[in-house]
Image (cartoon, grey):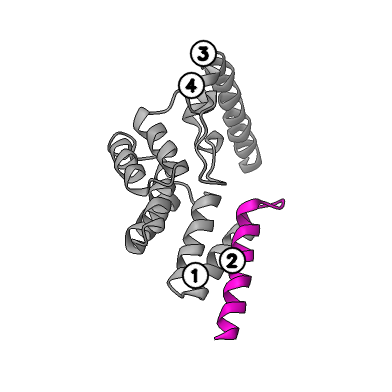
Amino acid sequence: MMNRVTAYVVLSGGFVAALAFYLIEPLRDPAVAQQADPESWPTCTSMAASDGPAWAPLDPDFAAGKRALAARDWDGAIRALESAALRDMRNADLQNYLGYAYGRLRHFENAVRHYEQALTLNARHRGAHQHLGETYLVVGDLVKAAEHLAELERICLIPCQEHDNLKRAIGEYKKTAAVH
């Protein structure tokens, strides 16, 4: 009897899921669906701004912040990105970019706060793990930097730039520490 009930529940759940997918999926606009899916958002593999069409639909302050990052205008980037963050509190990329701008100004407490916020929003955000690990190296915390490298090893199933960059930075840190 229990096996029949279990089989019925499994089959019913599968049927409901398939029906929901069938009914809802055609109604979704692919462009809107891609924007709504955080995994499809561009991750922060570099801090260069992109003026391409992928960034056209972004919040104008977010786009201005990315341009300011590319121009190395850290204060301008923070102003624009903070403004965008008031409207979009759930954007891990935005928080990562804010962390990066604060880090470049050597405001490490703010940088760490924004990187951690990015990771709260998306625990698999490779850019936030890389940049937070690098920030920990700058403040001399090799253990925490290594924790983020380990997290990137878990996240990156195939080689990824963020893992390689943090691994390289940790290696350079260790060489420098050995000399001093």
Q: CA distance from mark 2 to mark 4?
A: 37 Å
Q: Amino acid at mark 2?
A: Ala
Q: Report the residue marked by disc 3.
A: 27
Q: Which mark is residue 169?
A: 2
Sequence-wise, the earlier of marks 3 and 1 is 3
Q: Report the residue marked by disc 4.
A: 32
Q: Amino acid at mark 3?
A: Leu
Image quadrant where one finds the N terminus:
top right
Q: Residues within 10 Å of mark 3 (few under 14, many from 20)?
A: few
CB within 8 Å, label 2 to label 3 = no
CB within 8 Å, label 2 to label 1 = yes
Q: Amino acid at mark 1?
A: Leu
Q: CA distance from mark 3 to mark 1?
A: 48 Å
Which span is picked out in magenta? 154-180
Q: Which mark is residue 79?
A: none
Q: Nearer the viewer, mark 2 or mark 3?
A: 2
Q: CA distance from mark 4 to mark 3?
A: 11 Å
Give the main secondary structure, helix, strand or loop, of the magenta stretch.
helix
Q: Nearer the viewer, mark 2 or mark 4?
A: 2
Q: CA distance from mark 2 to mark 1?
A: 8 Å
